Amino acid sequence: MAISNELLKVLACPVCKSDLTQNKNQLKCKKCNVNYPIKDDIPILIPKN
């Protein structure tokens, strides 16, 4: 299932606070190019380090 546009508007990259875009089952930061998985329709926005 896709993340709603309303939710995408308020979500931000936890590393650089930039906007995220959805690509299938992950969210991608536009600025730092980091990918975050979506599991069971929940975005997992935990930075690796």
Image (cartoon, grey):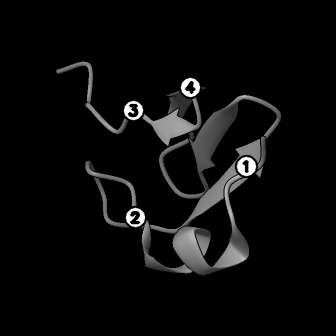
Three-letter amino acid code at the position of disc 2: Ala
Side of 8 where 2 appears, left or right: right
Q: Which mark is residue 5?
A: none
Residue 18 or residue 22, whichever sits in front: 22
Mark 1: which secondary structure? Answer: strand
The residue positioned 39% from the left and 32% from the top of the image is: 44
In this picture, residue 31 sits left or right of residue 18: right
Q: Which quadrant is home to the C terminus? A: top left
Residue annotated with mark 4: 40
Q: Dot 3 corresponds to which residue?
A: 44
Mark found first going from the N terminus, 1 or 3: 1
Q: Which residue is mark 1?
A: 22
Q: Which structural element holds mark 3?
A: loop
Q: CA distance from mark 4 to mark 3?
A: 10 Å
Q: Give the secondary structure at mark 2.
A: loop
10 Å crowding of disc 1: few (<14), some (14-19), many (20+): some
**Residue at 73% over, 49% down:** 22
Q: Closer to the observer: label 4 or label 3?
A: 4
Dot 4: what SS? loop
**Residue plotted at (26% across, 48% down):** 15
Estimate the x, y position of residue 41 in percent, counting from the top left.
Answer: 59, 37
| Residue type, numbered disc 4 | Asp
Q: Tell me the residue at 58%/68% (across/down).
A: 8
Give left or right: position of 7 versus 44: right
Mark 3 / mark 2, whichever is N-terminal: 2
Distance from Cα at disc 1 to Cα at disc 3:
13 Å
Counting from the top left corner in percent of width and height, residue 19 is at 53, 68
Mark 4 or mark 1, earlier in chain: 1
For the residues labelled 3 and 2, the Cα–Cα distance comes to 12 Å
Question: Which of the 4 quarters of the picture holds residue 40?
Answer: top right
Residue highlighted by disc 2: 12
